[in-house]
Amino acid sequence: MKGGIFSRAQFSNLGDYNSTDPFIKRFHAINKDIRTRTYGNFPPLRGNYEDWKSFIEDAVAEDAKASFELIEANQILAAWETALGIGKVSSFPISISASITDICNARCNFCAYLPERVSNQKLSFDQFQKANWLKFCRAFRPNGGGLGEPFAHPKILEILEQLRETAPYLSLGSVTNGSIMRPEVADIVAQYFSYLYVSVNAARKETYEWTMAPLKWERFVDNMDRLNDLKQRHGRERPWLRAGYVVHSGNLDELPELPALLRRFGFKDLNVNPMVPPPQYGRNQLLTEEASIFKIPHRADYVFRQLEQECAIHGIALSKALPSLKKLLGAAEGDRVCPQQNNPSIVATDREYHITPSSYKVPGMLSNTPKSLVITNRLSKKPIDKKVNTANAALRASKPKIRPAMVSMPQATGLNLAKVVVSNSDLEAMAETGDGVSYSYEWSVFENQNLIPICWAPWRALKIDIFERTQVCCNFFRKLPKFKWTNAKDFHSEKNMWNHPYMQHLRETMGTPEEVPFCTLCKSTDKRHLKNDKEKRSIMLKSQKKYYEIVAKVSGVELCGKLDSVKSPLPDWSIKSSLPDQRPISPYTKGIDYYRYSVFQHGFHNIGKVLMLARVPAVWAPFLAEVNESVHILSPRRGQCVIAEDVLKAFQFSNYKFTRLEQQLLVAAPSKLELYDAVWLDGLIFEAFIRDEVLLWVRKMLKNGGRLRVIGAPGIGKVAESILSNPESSSGKLETLRAGIQFSGKGSYFTQDGVLGALKKYNLALDRLMPPSGSRIVLADGVKGTEKLSETELIKKLELFVSGGELSPQKYLAGMDRTVSFAALAV
């Protein structure tokens, strides 16, 4: 399909009633009888559920031609399935956000992202060719919410052409820096895209090239001018252009110059976000907290007011309110209010809370939802009577500075107690008084629109990162089932993510006391505020525990051993060892769920025969043994083998065996040993054995397609740290550092960037689902960190220190990797 305009902004006039397409005719026959316009945060429920379900299933079976009607029918079916609380759905996601590449050609000085750390992954063109289900979806966002530059994909032109062929009515949009939009790509974007979010971040050449190096200002300007010209040539208002601007002290003053520039390029609105200081690792010259606008609130407020005037003059809408002076001051004086929450809505209410018209019966699980909220005084916790409510409403109308209320919600809605802000003026007051506040933005949206607090994201949204990990909303933890790119007929298989048993549980329990704990947190607490971080992490672990339980149940694996017999917390568990002194041992520091989920997360759940190379095998051995056919443990330390066997016997395991790991074993003929489905390798092995011999032997022991997981291999930081602790005997370790990642003898080290190359010569491929990660050095108390040095510069500092020519360079270790962990596949 070539040329023409393939996307529309609205679905106001769907198709042609006289069309000969059977599915278009069928759509108009059942698209009638609106049941309700006020139920939930989703579209009106038209027709009936059974007709729409049959419509979509038949369209899949008969490979119906793409049309607006297919998209609208899918959305109506999703709305019905949400209203009915259906877990195993027949609809497709309405909105898809998928990373197609993690490559980024910019190194912005406010962003710590380094795509080299994840080995430049990209979605293959073949995967897109399978995705004929996209014709049912309304919106597709390549790299819409992830990291990486979508137009850096080497086959971006072919991908866009394929999307245009498969799903010509799909609304396309993306996040881009606009620097590498080739003319032929820009032509498709101008015809087919609905919107672009463009990272601008400067209004002057010098600032742009300093902020977003190595990008060039002239190229960005040329690309934006070309896109604007193409839109006019095709007679299109779209793609709608939104500018993103991360504001800091270095680009603040030129912000009022931006609206005139944006108007020239055809931008419609502007989104200004205060810079959040990036983690200080990965590379030099990243901005720090000192560059934050919250350090210069008066100056920032003055510039913002100028910006608002310039936006009004040039017709550029500000997509969200800028921080007021009081909020800037409040954040600068001790984080009394989260600076990201710039325009909070009134969420506590005195009026009756209407859910639906009384004539409409709420389906199924929502029938017991209350029709009013109980407003209580925040200090006395006593109900406020009608007269007081009326008085408070009058006070709010005159914008007084009153105390926030607490809104008590019954458990039937998934909320125990939602702590919310009464009004915008309260937030201003708290910036002055320091009074704490925690409220849920999501809950405020429900309340403002007078809707039932039922989120329909699990029926609507699908976010897929470059490693095929999935989310249903921006804040949901990334521990959902992996997404498999497949065709429409296989899309709804329970083995794929969209109808995975955990997704079914997530939908079926939404708004009930059994709902996923993270969903309850989302509707009751400000997840984005640092003060709630501990609670959020705790809730995430509970939600992941449920995920593990469901996966274990459907995997068909019967747990071996008696790990669940431990009644007390696992860190408190201990037994008497078989060591000569029979001392008690307590090897665990975390709970059972942590270890179980780690085994599952790393792909070692129900994998078959596992080989475990470890210096300290006791911790992981039972958790590998309980979900696999067998575990063969090799360890060079006899005492640790004794402890591991004591632990396995205590939990009544029998599917294991031990072998003493000797140097000569690593060069033994592999025919003498059986092959394994996976190898779990303790990185400490590389401190005692030659890396070449270990990895070569491991590859010989792995079946083709087998999995390798390396945990805690020595990183450059660990080698440097050992030199600092014992400079007298450091000559060999300095030589190791000088040799770099290429050195593969005893004591060799890994870097996150060097793992890929280290594995290739052993026919091991880095697992793209689990990129290398590091455990970074934390400086001792009283030691102030500095910017990271290159490896060469660090070695020079260490050499001077060893020779007595420099003070301890410990401060240069900040952010360096003590250990590196990674996963690989045998190819």
Image: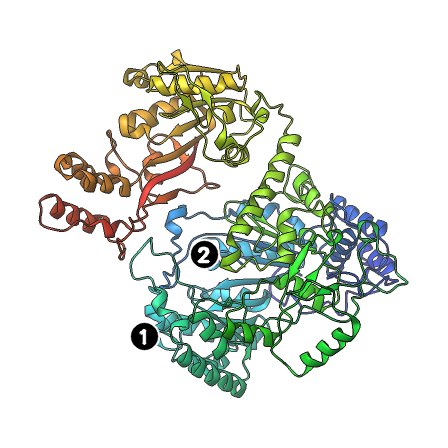
Which of 67/308 is in front?
Answer: 308
Q: Is residue 31 left or right of residue 288?
A: right
| Amino acid type of the residue that numbered disc 1 sits on in the rendered structure | Glu
- The residue pinned by badge 2 equals 148
Residue 345 at x, y percent in the picture: 63, 71
Q: How many circles with numbers are drawn on the protein?
A: 2
Residue 151 image point, x, y percent: 47, 59
> What's the amino acid at mark 2?
Gly
Question: Residue 666: horizontal and vertical position, in percent?
Answer: 32, 19
802, 770: nearer the viewer: 802
Q: In the rendered structure, find residue 206 and report the number of the disc placed on it.
A: 1
Q: Quadrant of the C terminus?
A: top left
Look at the image and tell me whether residue 237 can be seen: no
514 lies left or right of 544 = right
Q: Of all residues shown, which one is farthest toward the right?
A: 359
- Which residue is painted at 18% across and 41% down in the image? 738
Q: Quadrant of the N terminus?
A: bottom right
Tell me residue 320's x, y (percent): 56, 73
User: What residue sits 59% from the left and 41% below the top?
Assistant: 481
